[in-house]
Image: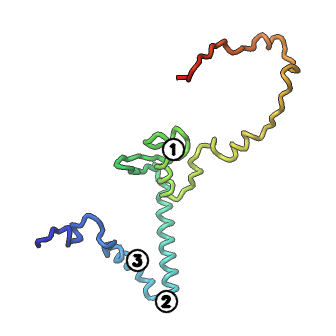
Amino acid sequence: MEEPPERWSRLWFPRRRYDMLTKNMVESMNSVLLKGRKMPILRMLDFIQEKLGEWFYEWRKKVFNLDSILFRISSEGIKFIVDLKKRTCDCLQFQLDELPCPYAIATINNRYLQKSDYCSNWYSKKTWLKTYEGHVNTVEDKKLWDIPQNVQSEITKPPDIEILQGRRQ
């Protein structure tokens, strides 16, 4: 009793001691896998894999059917709320750049979604290809240009500016 409880009791220890988990998780799995225990080892492993696949499928379906996809992401004590449907984040980077911010990427990765689905169309391959699909014609010598008189009178020339010596402020 001379030692503080943090030294000898798992209940008072601030972290997991020796990477041990409570046995509640194991007991829960045992109750689910009772049917598989009586099977041969390879069939039991298949049974466990199928059960886990069913669970992940059901959880994924539940998450995809959420009306609002709000997640709280914590970074250095600051909490950010990411809404994937509205494509917003409290850090404002997601809505300004129209690209997922680090907090949105963490949220997207958490849900096993494609990051490219949350980028603006301006960053898509299709848009980039459209940008460069036209032809660029070469420009002849300026002396050969035929400029109509009504257009020539509207041409604005740059203002006369005195360039100051020294480094610009």
State the SS at label 3: helix
Whether the residues at callouts 3 and 1 have beta carbons within 8 Å, the answer is: no
Q: Is residue 101 left or right of residue 134?
A: left
Position above or below: 110 against 6:
above
The three-letter amino acid code for the residue at tag 1 is Arg
The mark found on residue 87 in the picture is 1
Residue that numbered label 2 is attached to: 40
The mark found on residue 161 in the picture is none
Q: Nearer the viewer, mark 3 or mark 1?
A: 1
Q: Nearer the viewer, residue 36 or 152?
A: 152
Image location (x, y in percent) of residue 14: 25, 64
Q: Nearer the viewer, residue 89 or 61?
A: 89
Position above or below: 143 against 63:
above
Q: Is residue 140 left or right of residue 28?
A: right
User: Which residue is drawn at the image coordinates 29% and 71% (left, top)?
Assistant: 17
Total tally of numbered discs in the picture: 3
Sequence-wise, the earlier of marks 2 and 3 is 3
User: Which residue is drawn at the image coordinates 69% and 43% (left, top)?
Assistant: 128
User: Which residue is drawn at the image coordinates 45% and 47% (left, top)?
Assistant: 82
The mark found on residue 32 in the picture is 3
The three-letter amino acid code for the residue at tag 2 is Pro
Image location (x, y in percent) of residue 168: 55, 23
Sequence-wise, the earlier of marks 2 and 1 is 2
Between the C-alphas of marks 2 and 1, the distance is 49 Å
State the SS at label 2: loop
Give the colouring mode of the picture.
Answer: rainbow
Image location (x, y in percent) of residue 12: 21, 66
Image location (x, y in percent) of residue 42: 52, 86
The three-letter amino acid code for the residue at tag 3 is Val
Whether the residues at callouts 2 and 1 have beta carbons within 8 Å, the answer is: no
Sequence-wise, the earlier of marks 3 and 1 is 3
